[in-house]
Amino acid sequence: MKKLLLIAGLLAGSVMFANAQLLTKSPDKRVTHQMKALQKNLNLDATQAEKINTILLARATKVDSLKANTTDDKKANRQAIKALMQTSEDQVNAVLTADQQKTYVQLKETRKAKMKKRGGDQTTGTQPKKG
């Protein structure tokens, strides 16, 4: 009986590990997904889409390399990622028209609110109530 439980536990662990690997997407796939959403919501023209794709791909690649670098100071890595995100947001805003910028800000606020609702309020340390 113990062997059966051990085998079942190992099997469950290997399935969870395999699923975790499938959930981590490459920078190309993440940017492709982001671009689909941006083109749908912002009505980007071909030139804008190409420029933004380049910006987002460069950002995703750099962020992945910073996250993979676990030997350096984690606080410094987080600060570098934050600076990189701000720089890329500024670059994206430079490509967008004024109306697109307003819509882009609304999209980011909506996404931020969804994340906050899902993960709890980080400022107060409270978790969402389960229903």
Image: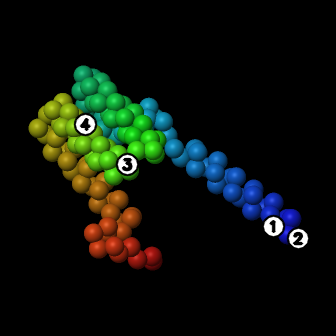
Q: Could you tell me the amino acid type at mark 2?
A: Met
Amino acid identity at mark 1: Leu
Q: Residues within 10 Å of mark 1 (few under 14, many from 20)?
A: few
Report how far apart the C-alphas of labels 4 and 1 lie in the structure: 50 Å
Determine the image quadrant of residue 67. Answer: top left
> In the rendered structure, which disc, 4 or 1, sits on the residue that comes first in sequence?
1
> Where 51 sits versus 42, above or below?
above
Q: Which mark sits nearer the N-terminus, 3 or 1? A: 1
Say whether disc 2 or disc 3 marks the residue closer to the N-terminus.
Answer: 2
Q: For mark 1, what is the residue?
A: 5
Q: Is residue 92 above or below residue 21?
A: above
Q: Position of residue 78 (x, y in %)?
A: 33, 49
Q: Residues within 10 Å of mark 2 (few under 14, many from 20)?
A: few
Do residues under tags 2 and 1 come within 8 Å of each other at their CB atoms?
Answer: yes
Mark 4 touching mark 3, by CB under 8 A?
A: no
Residue 41 picture quarter? top left
Label 3 crowding class (10 Å Cα cut-off): few <14, some 14-19, many 20+?
Answer: few
Task: Specify how the rendered protein is coloured.
Answer: rainbow
Q: Secondary structure at mark 1?
A: helix
